[in-house]
Image: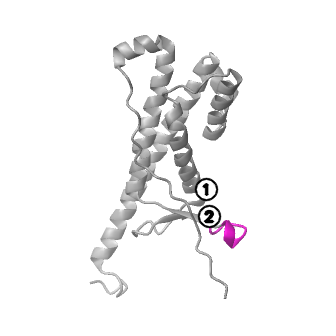
Amino acid sequence: MSDTLSSEFSEIDVVESIQQEERYFLALGRFTNAFAQAESSLKSFLADLLEIDVHTANAAFGGQRMKPTMDAIRRLHERRNSDLDDLYAPIVEQLGQILKARDGLVHWGARNIATSEAIVTNARYAHTSKAVRFFPISADLLDDMTDDINDIDLRLQLATWRRKIGKKEFIEIYGEVEPPAWRYKHQPKPALQSKKP
């Protein structure tokens, strides 16, 4: 073992730590790319609902983030007194959960990513100890989110395509779309509070 390494860590520990960090950041990159694709598909779905072309929609909603876009889709259905598209409706809750995790990752960052106890937390920014929140994160959880967001993206594209060709023809060509089987489960937790005597 090298003299420069702490006696607490072996060279194997250091290599494993570096590999875990690399795996985490690769998973984070894949997730970020998939999220961007789904965000674009969500805006295309809104454009289709509004019966305007994507370029016009981007001119009007280009800077709009995912949550306001989801809210606009919901409000549009309320205004039209119609149910959410049956391909879109099942993704709303899961997309919301992934959006919460994504926002935590982007705004708070992750801690301890080279360990099995990596978390995303607002501890550095929370205005009180009661406002502190955290949730676990890992390359595996990021991969689960990526799989789900890819499924969401596909469902958004299918919903847009089905609106263009009609439900009957869509089912004749593609059949019924199976309900989603989500992998990621968002698990936000409040920080542990010290017990007062």
Specify the segment rendered in magenta: 123-131
Dot 2 alpha-carbon crowd within 10 angstroms: few under 14, some 14 to 19, many 20 or more: many
Image x and y of residue 63, in percent = 67, 35
125 magenta-colored: yes
Image x and y of residue 37, in percent = 49, 35
Residue shown at 45%/46% (left/top)? 31
For label 2, the residue is 122
Task: Assess whether mark 2 and mark 1 are in contact (beta carbons under 8 angstroms).
Answer: yes
Residue shown at 63%/34% (left/top)? 69
Amino acid type for the residue under numbered disc 1: His
- Closer-to-camera residue (100/195): 195
Image x and y of residue 35, in percent = 50, 41
Q: Nearer the viewer, mark 1 or mark 2?
A: 2
Residue 54 visible from this viewpoint: no
Left or right: where 16 falls relative to 77: left
Q: Is residue 96 above or below residue 78?
A: below
Element at label 1: helix
Residue shown at 50%/13% (left/top)? 164
The image quarter containing residue 12 is bottom left
Q: Is residue 98 above or below residue 133?
A: above
Q: Which mark is residue 107?
A: 1
Element at label 2: loop
Residue shown at 35%/20% (left/top)? 175
